[in-house]
Image (tube, helix red, strand yellow):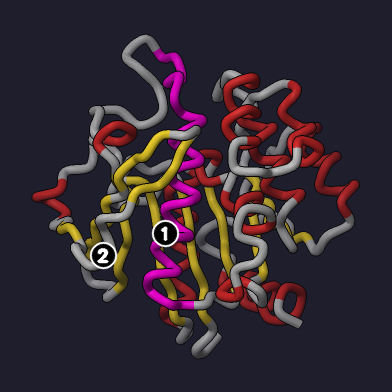
Amino acid sequence: MKDKRILYVSSELIPYLPETEVSKMAFEVPKEMHHKGAQIRMFMPRFGVINERRHQLHEVIRLSGMNLIINDMDMPLIIKVASVPKERMQVYFIDNDEYFKRKAVFKDEDGNLFEDNDERAIFFAKGVVETVKKLKWAPDIIHVHGWLASLLPLYIREFYKNDPLFAESKIITTAFNYSKIGVLNKENLIEKIKFDQIPEEKLSEFKKINCESLLKIAIQNSDAIIKGTENLSEEISSEIEKLKKPVLEFHPHDNFSEAYINFYLNEVLS
């Protein structure tokens, strides 16, 4: 993997959020590829539950300062960065007071998904791309973990389709089981994405907008898929089979390195 450029984008990441199937693999995979000589960049949202002092986050002024247009509203983009202890890896945090300052991740105190998770997902996708553009860093692979990051493949393939920085980039989505997470407002999400001139026919999966729909949109706009869990839903398993794209079967976090490297080099980049 020496000198391959890999952009890792995740909605969850240890040690900044509690350990889950998503947050652990979203950390272990880039760590292993970093050890194998890959050049990596890692991105996640700067949720309000993240202790900035403990994790030593600081704002990157040269990357912050632009506004992203979300549903005809100007939303300031703030970029923060931290170093993963002992690993010499930097994590970039996409931040905005309106979307990420609250002391919660995806749900309110009653266990309901936030009404603006759709806008948060759009903001996160655009924020990642605009930051990578400022870095002038063209990734060979873009690897996506987590449902709030699931709009990134769609936006790269449609909204940023003419950007030369990503012309050669291959997109991988790791599929997890999101069937029990909840439902978003489909009318709002479709209209907000259509505002960015993304064709409505690309949004057919949003007829029922649960988090599995977001995952299906992600894998449809990816070049390859990795199964991140042994227990994918029947809906997602059927979608993966139907797409006929390169697929890597599930490998646990303690036994994935060789399989992932072979998949990257021989199935995705070949």
Name the residue furthest top. Answer: 110
Q: Alpha-carbon neighbours of circle 2 within 10 Å: few (<14), some, or many (≥20)?
A: some
Q: What residue does disc 2 label?
A: 84
Asked if the residue at tag 2 contacts the one at tag 1, i.e. Cβ–Cβ closer than 8 Å, the answer is: yes
Residue 91 seen: yes
Residue at disc 2, secondary structure? strand
Residue at left offset 59%, top offset 28%:
189
Q: Position of residue 196 (x, y in %)?
A: 59, 42
Q: Position of residue 202 (x, y in %)?
A: 77, 41
Quarter assignment of residue 88: bottom left
Q: Position of residue 73 (x, y in %)?
A: 41, 34
Prevailing SS of the magenta stretch: helix
In magenta stretch: residue 117: yes
Residue at left offset 29%, top offset 41%:
96
What segment carries the magenta color? 111-137
Residue 183 seen: no
In magenta stretch: residue 195: no
Left or right of 79 on screen, residue 126: right
